[in-house]
Amino acid sequence: MSLLLVHLGTLMSLRKLVDQWKSVTVSIAGVCGIMLLTMTIGRALFGWHTVVAATPPLTGGIVAALLMSEAVKAKGLMDLAVLPIAMYIMHGFIGYPLTSYCLKKESNRLLSDFRKNGVNEDLLKSSNEVAVAHEETQRKKLIPPLPEKYQTTYIILLKIMLVALLANFVSNLTNQAVNQYIICLIFGVAFCELGFLEETALVKAGVFGWLITGLMAYIFSGLSSVTPQALSKMILPLITLIILGVLGMFIMSMIVGKFMGFTKEMGFACALTALFGFPADYILTNEACKSVCKTDAEKNYILDIILPRMLVGGFTTVSIASVVIAGIFVKLL
């Protein structure tokens, strides 16, 4: 888990997050909306432990689900052990169609304006900034990269392990006041910015899929003690909490998005990235643009506006916010 969290840090670009601060703000507002309704109405309906176990996976991806599943089992709450994983699997069924609908609405609006008024330079400005940020990631860093022949699986894994060990050591120094996984994420970002770690480190090492598969096998093997009766009891809170979370997400993203200059569809779509992240956000955006655009010029124009917002939204919610929330909620069980 520590290796995966350090790896997540190497996926991020601080410059992109700063340039797309409006998307970051709207996405975080959506996540806050999830917690607002699940921790109030949801808590009143299903109790503290159920809501605490289910909320972090609803705000993000597999890492949050794994963290909460492990924490629930460590507390001996085996009846709830399946809930975080089930939440991770199920919320996409609502997230995908809703996001597709919002993106198509936004694409049609932008396309209509494009056909009527031509290119809107202000809307394209943020995309140009993201492109510049991508180019600047190639700039020299404090620690120069190793020669290509030394960037092997073993060397990359060694460096990730060293950063993970350092993160765990620092967490122990704080007497676990700050969760070790949050520190792993922060150190992953920091050491990648310094140049010690490669970008997308575990992918470059060729072991990301293997580690995820191993972790999933470990988690699912621990669910063997969950009975069908316990699973059936999860259906009602699972569906209800998803509905509450999505409703809270819509309300907050609409309110905050209005101040950021986003339409309610664009704001909601950015927030909904919490329910799936990358690569689904990339695929859904491309498919929405293809379905409404007739020419490559129209498609490229719409993509240049929407895609950076969606990608940054996904990084913000799944890679950052959900991990931080899970690290906090682990202590609340």
Image (cartoon, grey):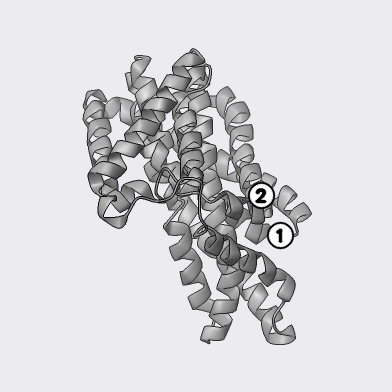
Residue 265, position as x, y percentages in the image: 64, 60
Q: Residue at x 27, y 48 (%)?
A: 209
Tag 1's secondary structure?
A: loop
Q: Nearer the viewer, residue 120 or 5?
A: 5
Q: Nearer the viewer, residue 23 or 227?
A: 23
- Earlier along the polypeptide chain: callout 2 or callout 1? 2
Can residue 86 be seen in this snapshot?
A: no
Is residue 236 shown left or right of residue 297?
left
Labels 2 and 1 touching (C-beta < 8 A): yes
Tag 2's secondary structure?
A: helix
Pointer 1 residue: 262
Query: Given the current orientation, which residue lies at the most extreme right position?
Result: 259
Residue type indicated by callout 1: Phe
Pointer 2 residue: 26
Q: Nearer the viewer, residue 309 or 165?
A: 165
Q: Residue at x 34, y 14 (%)?
A: 76
- Residue 294's tag is none
Can residue 54 be seen in this snapshot?
A: yes
Q: Nearer the viewer, residue 10 or 42?
A: 10
Q: Is residue 225 above or below residue 148?
A: above
Residue type indicated by callout 2: Val
Residue 156, position as x, y percentages in the image: 31, 44
Q: Residue at x 40, y 29 (%)?
A: 67
